[in-house]
Image (cartoon, rainbow, N blue to C red):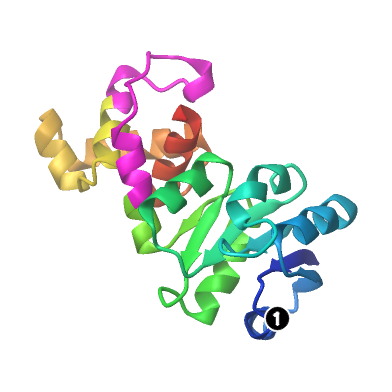
Amino acid sequence: MIDVLVVDDNPIMRAALQGILAADERLRVVAEAANGQEALALARRLRPAITLLDYRMPIADGLSVVSALGQHSAVLVLTSSDDPQVIADMLHRGARGYLVHGEFQPNDLIRAVHEVVGGRGWLSPIAASVAVSMAREQVPRKQGDPAYGGLTDRELEVVNLLCQGLSNAAIAEQLWVTEKTVKNHLNHIFAKLGVRSRTEAVVRWTAQRS
């Protein structure tokens, strides 16, 4: 079973999330919290596999506790806020995923929970755009640096172009190589970063560079 902590100041939203998660027998909501302070206390005691965290809450909002929560639980932000600065701050402080209400279906939420618990990222389209922007602002790294996955010079070029939103075809044209070569580089990058998709690679690369 995957234990889930649901954090939202709206009781109707908490009930709705419980109903969605109940559709997957592998998920179990072990507690609810109405603010960040309650959430942190519950996370310390229960150590759930994942916390669904709202941003806007009284007493202590999601941003103020996301780093501390991340020490006890994987954090998936689930909120109505699509403010790029909020998204960037949440990701910088350790959130592994960010979903914006209205940009996902119930099945997306269930899949996101499993992906985040599995150590991968999950982002709404707006959050993915912010992650790409964050990656663009970072300074290029040195070849073979173990803190950054030990990427080669060419892999660094590919991942940086990936973070700029370029397709495989566009990357191939930029580097004067074939699309097959780009795909091979991406497979090596994914393996070194421990991810399985382009979006996850951008998120992981961004997190490692922050």
Q: Start and end of the magenta stretch?
A: 130-156
State the image quarter where residue 177 is shown: top left
Residue 39 position, x and y percent, is: 76, 59
Residue positioned 45% across, 64% down in the render = 81
State the image quarter where residue 182 is shown: top left
Residue 24 position, x and y percent, is: 69, 79
Residue positioned 35% across, 39% down in the render = 134
Q: Secondary structure at mark 1?
A: helix
Residue positioned 64% across, 54% down in the render = 75
Say which residue label 1 marks: 18
State the image quarter where residue 25 is shown: bottom right
Callout 1: 10 Å neighbours few (<14), some, many (20+)?
some
Residue 149 position, x and y percent, is: 49, 25
Residue 127's place in the image compared with 6, above or below, is above
Q: Which part of the image, by quadrant, shows the N terminus?
A: bottom right
Q: Is residue 53 left or right of residue 197?
A: right
Residue 188 position, x and y percent, is: 41, 33
